[in-house]
Amino acid sequence: MSTIDREPAIFTAWHKALNQFSNQKKLPGLVLSIYKENEEPLLWSEATGSGSLDQPYFITEIGNLHLLAIILKLKVRGLLKLDQPITDFLTDKMYEGLITIGGKDYTHEVTIAHLLSQNSGIPDFLNYSKGKENPIKEDILSGADLDWDWTEIINRTKGQKPNFKPGKSKKGIYSSTNEQLLGKVIESINGEPLEKTLNDFHFSRLSMNQTYVYKDPNDRTPALFSYKSNPINSPLAMVSMGASGGIVSTAKDCLTFVKSFFHGHLFPLSELEQTMKWLPIKQGLSQGKGILRYQKPRMLLTASKDPEIIGYSGFTSGAFSFYIPEYQTFMTGTTNQCDDSLLPYKLVSSMLKQL
């Protein structure tokens, strides 16, 4: 099913490319919205298989873009600095020893910028395992449904060996704990739950009427994402992710947000420049401060560069919200899978070839 404003030839090409990609990758369903800025802007949306344009889905790690937008707005208001230690805001003793190396506590050296750039060295609480038990993430992907509270997040983080000293890696290593801590920093500054800040700053302001923080494990509205062709039904885990990682949205709402983000409607656009100092992750994917960039590696030095894709993707859900500056094009949607974290970028690259 597709929705279009008119029928130029590019829509036919996108329709064919999307269905071909879905069939080649054997995906049960895809959702994609494209907005291309021209003198007469183009808007095209389509879903394949079990995908539905109207059904909300978990955006998981894309929540980092929402956190970044809020952080930059608070920075402009003079309420924080990116190089400010998180212990200026997280003063409870429970945070002591969050990252300890060689008997020394480096928690006070972790800055907001380190959390945003995934360069804090703080382990991912989802990778915690006790004894011979599987890491929490593996249990969830295997079909288990687990819940946890904030104390458990901190204790599971402390129960692991740190990745490196804060800011001392030349690569970005993703940790869900980073976004959870960013949420707590925002709550400390605003004196209110992160969910309310998200509603006031983004959801309500931008009329994102199908976007909300997942709080009710009996809520079956969001589409399930899959792992190895098996649907992952973990409502308790998604509730436990809270407002930092448990946002539900649609391609339409995500398109509204990502356009506002890159058009400077949420914070001064000049603030974005400092977020785009890239640390490599893997295979053309790089981490900035709260933002990702993908540029397909060139097979030959003489080959032309592929356009850069910036924004964020949900590594654990297949959701994505991207801006492609070279084409002045935005793409949002979901592949509803977590087998291949680069699949959203491959999808977008295949659609760009039609331009």
Image: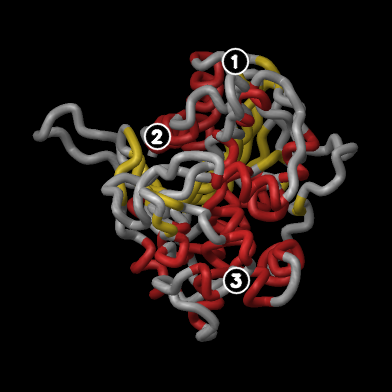
User: Is residue 187 found left or right of 97 in the rendered image?
Assistant: right
**Residue 94 appears in which quarter of the rendering?**
bottom right
Quadrant that contains the C terminus: top left
Q: Which of these two is toward me, 186 or 197?
A: 186
Spot occupied by residue 237 in the image (x, y as percentages of width and height)? 73, 37
Q: Earlier in the sequence, mark 1 or mark 2?
A: 1
Q: Is residue 323 visible?
A: no
Q: Residue furthest front?
A: 103
Q: How many marks?
A: 3
Front of the two marks 1 and 2: 1
Residue plotted at (54% across, 82% down): 79
* Residue 118: percent from left, percent from top: 43, 51
CA gap, disc 1 and disc 2? 23 Å
The foreground one among 120 and 304 is 120
Q: Amino acid at mark 1?
A: Lys
Choose between 324 and 220: the one closer to the eye.
Answer: 220
Amino acid beneath label 3:
Thr
Q: Which residue is mark 1?
A: 228
Looking at the rendered image, the quarter that the N terminus falls into is top right
Relative to 347, 181 lies left or right: right
Kindly identify which residue carries mark 3. Answer: 91
Can you tell which of label 3 and label 2 is closer to the viewer? 3
